[in-house]
Amino acid sequence: MNSIIAIVGRPNVGKSTFFNRLVQKREAIVDAVSGVTRDRHYGKSDWNGKEFSIIDTGGYTIGSDDIFEEEIRKQVALAIDEADIIVFVVDVEDGITPMDAEVAKILRKVKKPIFIAVNKVDNAMRAANAVEFYNLGLGDYHTISSINGSGTGDLLDAITKKIPDIEIEESSEESKEEQLPRFAVVGRPNAGKSSFINALIGEDRNIVTNIAGTTRDAIDTKYNRFGFDFNLVDTAGIRKKSKVKEDLEFYSVMRAVRSIEYSDVIILVVDATRGFEGQDQNIFWLAEKNRKGVVILVNKWDLIEKETNTMRDFKARVTKEIEPFTDVPIVFISALTKQRLFKAIETAVDVFKNRKNRISTSKFNDTMLEIVKHNPPPAIKGKFVKIKYCMQLPTPTPQFVFFCNLPQYVKDPYKRFVENKLREIYNFSGVPITIYFRQK
Ligand code: GDP
Ligand code: GDP
């Protein structure tokens, strides 16, 4: 599980510049809904071998000229709720502004690790000016220049010291192999998540156990429905939902980030009457990036007027939006009429199992080497790629390596070809897989 780092601060201090420095563009999420001033909010990165997720909360500020103090206060509050580590960015050119002082006041009460990044310290002369930020009352600060990168390495060193080792987490994940599937029900506001959960587990909420989350405040609640045992992940955010009604859109992303990190399979609830929208795509992307299983539930199917190909056409449109990872089950449900709820859970359990698929190396070689022998990568500059050996890696989620003489000549289309073949032969429906080509 990755730690979540939230970047907070008022507009124009350089939050998104800092964010972009940490996250390569293609890794970042594009938010089509609230992208009034910015379009990047969430990304994954790593430093010193530690992976983490970053949220640029500033991306949700509407307009940078007419600053909404209230807006920023809310965002800081949300970041505090959902993040593990907070980076408070301030601007050395402006010094401490009243709004900085306001944010600092909120942060002083927070128990989570907080880092002050004094940005725009592009040269040594400006470093001296940073001293005034001691007056924020949050202790020491780091001077950085998001534009030229100076200081950002030291800041990341300090931040990553607060992040637990991935190795420990992964091995503990392995030792919990027998654990029940952990499902997170996510989606846009009003897609029907609560209705789905209620329809599924009913009013009596047949709770078997309540297991408090380990390091963070998520709770798994164990259920049995239709003969399947599973946990639904309930984050602190979900329980506090009522407090932050106004921020639903932003909130749903924060909440999704958190619960996706916690679960094995993401149950993405989509509103059939609205179609598969930008925010649905974002959440899907989060799941894929985090190598979680995914099931798409198209809810409110009772409201759709159906003709012969309505379902097929809807499916085709969704598939187009989730390219290239299209091997994902889509189930059409109604939380209202309880249509296909069994199918929904059965599919989620299947995806959980698919994610645990382990293929024996000898069988994998027999099958895949035969295929690549008959369909080798195209020769480049008269050089031929020879794939000699392949195997599934002993990782918690499916990853494969193909050993060959010239891995640099294996291009994306061929990797996709191999992935498609692999998906045809083995059942990895709903599961992101990674394929590497390496020199033997
Ligand atoms: P945000 O509103 O906090 O996300 O701020 P932006 O990242 O959009 O940056 C606001 C402005 O500050 C932009 O014009 C940036 O180019 C500039 N800026 C960001 N970081 C630095 C820096 O380290 N040094 C200087 N000189 N300018 C910066
Ligand atoms: P959430 O915000 O995703 O938890 O959405 P809710 O479960 O609160 O549902 C939002 C609205 O959609 C409510 O008015 C529900 O009654 C309605 N709704 C949810 N599922 C269905 C469904 O399958 N069919 C119909 N017709 N309405 C639904």
Image (cartoon, rainbow, N blue to C red):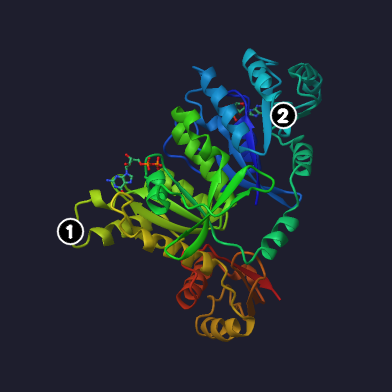
- Residue 364's label in the rendered image is none
Check contact, mark 1 vs mark 2: CB within 8 A.
no
Q: Quadrant of the C terminus?
A: bottom right
Residue 186: image x %, image y %? 46, 47
Q: Kindly report the distance in space between the C-alpha atoms of the residues bearing marks 1 and 2.
A: 57 Å
SS for callout 1: loop
* In this picture, residue 393 sits left or right of residue 42: right
Q: Where does residue 194 sit, x and y in percent of width and height?
A: 41, 44
Residue 335 to residue 402: above or below: above
Residue in the picture at 71% in, 23% down: 108
Task: Residue at 65% x, 35% y: name it.
Answer: 18
Q: Which residue is mark 2?
A: 117
**Percent from the top left, x then y, of residue 137?**
76, 19
Quadrant of res 73: top right
**Amino acid at pointer 2:** Ala
In this figure, which residue is indicated by the disc labeled 1? 307
Q: Is residue 76 left or right of residue 204?
A: right
Amino acid type of the residue tagged 1 in the rendering: Glu
Residue 357 percent across, percent down from the top left: 56, 72
Q: Earlier in the sequence, mark 1 or mark 2?
A: 2
